[in-house]
Structures are given as structure tokens and as C-alpha cells.
Image (cartoon, rainbow, N blue to C red):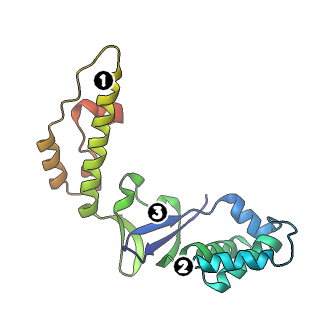
């Protein structure tokens, strides 16, 4: 399984995940991606990356590997880490996909000040769950309104939902807050 490069963003302290593709790892290993180019073309690639904030050494290593290859998997991950992540964040770590929380609350992922495992910050997840519920009800009501059978709209108890979201004790309990009328469409039974 492909590993993920996880880092804490400089901008807001949130967590970002970089997922190198199999073909990127292959090109860094085998080279030849750009083929033969005119004089100065490779240098222009390095300069473009530097202009985006990539460290000059990381940009040169990436271009060299894309042209010539020669990297093992660990070196390829390091080049991607240094080129695509280092200028955007800190506490950069390689993690297995199954070490990450469910993506439902992806925009509420946080880590400790020292890096480490990724957790869901309930303070940030609560408004996300509210948005998920509102969007699901709106989508279902739109579908029902356009239906020939003209089903009645979903009658969500918004105060009860808001209260349940506020009082959820963990990520799982928060995720279970959902209008009863939509449980079967979400597989919550």
C-alpha cells in the first residue's frame, strides 16, 4: 500500500496529506519522464519550482531524478517530501493510510505540537457535521421535490440535531448525529 506523507501546515496548524502516486515513484526510480529537451529546459523546470517556494536543492534533486531516475522507494519519498511538502509545513512524517482517521472530518484533523498521530479536533468537527447534515437534507429535499411522486420534504428537528452535535463526546458519536429519516440512505440503519 502506498504510504502517505503527513505534515502540519504552517498557515493554520491543520494537517495535510500528500499521496505520491505509483507512477511518480516509478519515474523517480526509472527516469526518462521528460525525455530529451532543449538546452536550458531542465534549468527552467528547477527555476519554476523555486519560484513556487520549493528549496533549490529539492527542486534540483526532483528534476534530476525525473530525468535520470536511480532512486529507491525511500529516496523517492524523500524527494517528494522535500519538493512538495517541506515549504508548506513541518513535522513531516511518512504514515500508512490506516493510521489516519476517517476522512469524514478531514478538515478537523489536528496533531500535537510535536507531530505524531493525527486526531479529530471536536471543536472543528462539530460545525463540519452540521454542514454535512444540512447538505444531506438539502440534497434529499431537492431530489424529493423533483420526483414525480412528490414526496414530502425531510422534516429534520434542527434544535435536536444542534444539541446532539454540541454534546457529542467523540468522533464516532458526532458522526452518528443524523436525521432519522435519512439513516437508511446513509447505511446507519
Rendered image: mark on residue 8: none
- Circle 1: element type: helix
Q: Which residue is mark 1?
A: 145
Across and down, in percent, residue 90 comes to 47, 80
Dot 3 or dot 1: first in sequence order is: 3
Q: Is residue 45 left or right of residue 89?
A: right
Compared to residue 133, the image places residue 171 above or below, namely: below
Q: Residue furthest bottom?
A: 57
Q: Callout 3: few (<14), some (14-19), or many (20+) C-alpha neighbours within 10 Å?
A: few
Q: Which residue is mark 3?
A: 99
- Circle 3: element type: helix
- Which of 87 and 22 lies nearest the eye of the viewer? 87
Quadrant housing the N terminus: bottom right
> Number of numbered discs present?
3
- Circle 2: element type: loop
Q: Callout 2: few (<14), some (14-19), or many (20+) C-alpha neighbours within 10 Å?
A: many
Q: Which residue is mark 2?
A: 86
Compared to residue 120, the image places residue 84 above or below, namely: below
Q: Is residue 15 left or right of residue 39?
A: left
Front position among marks 3 and 1: 1
Across and down, in percent, residue 123 comes to 23, 63
Q: What separation in Å lies between label 3 and label 1 (alpha carbons)?
A: 41 Å
Residue at 42% across / 78% down in the picture? 10
Q: Residue furthest top?
A: 149
Amino acid at each position: 500500500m502506498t504510504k502517505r506523507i503527513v505534515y502540519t501546515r504552517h498557515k493554520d496548524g491543520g494537517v495535510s496529506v500528500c499521496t505520491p502516486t505509483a507512477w511518480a515513484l516509478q519515474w523517480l526510480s526509472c527516469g526518462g519522464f521528460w525525455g530529451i529537451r532543449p538546452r536550458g529546459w531542465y534549468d527552467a523546470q528547477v527555476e519554476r519550482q523555486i519560484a513556487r517556494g520549493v528549496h533549490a536543492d529539492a527542486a534540483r534533486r526532483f528534476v534530476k531524478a525525473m530525468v535520470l531516475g536511480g532512486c529507491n522507494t525511500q529516496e523517492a519519498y524523500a524527494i517528494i517530501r522535500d519538493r512538495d511538502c517541506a515549504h508548506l509545513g513541518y513535522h513531516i512524517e511518512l504514515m500508512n493510510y490506516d493510521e489516519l482517521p476517517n476522512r469524514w472530518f478531514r478538515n478537523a484533523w489536528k496533531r500535537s505540537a510535536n507531530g505524531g498521530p493525527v486526531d479529530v479536533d471536536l471543536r472543528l468537527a462539530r460545525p463540519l457535521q452540521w454542514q454535512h447534515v444540512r447538505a444531506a437534507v438539502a440534497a434529499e429535499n431537492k431530489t424529493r421535490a423533483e420526483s414525480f411522486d412528490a414526496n414530502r420534504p425531510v422534516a429534520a428537528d434542527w434544535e435536536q440535531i444542534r444539541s446532539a452535535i454540541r454534546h457529542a463526546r467523540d468522533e464516532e458519536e458526532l458522526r452518528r448525529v443524523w436525521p432519522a429519516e435519512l439513516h437508511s440512505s446513509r447505511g446507519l440503519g
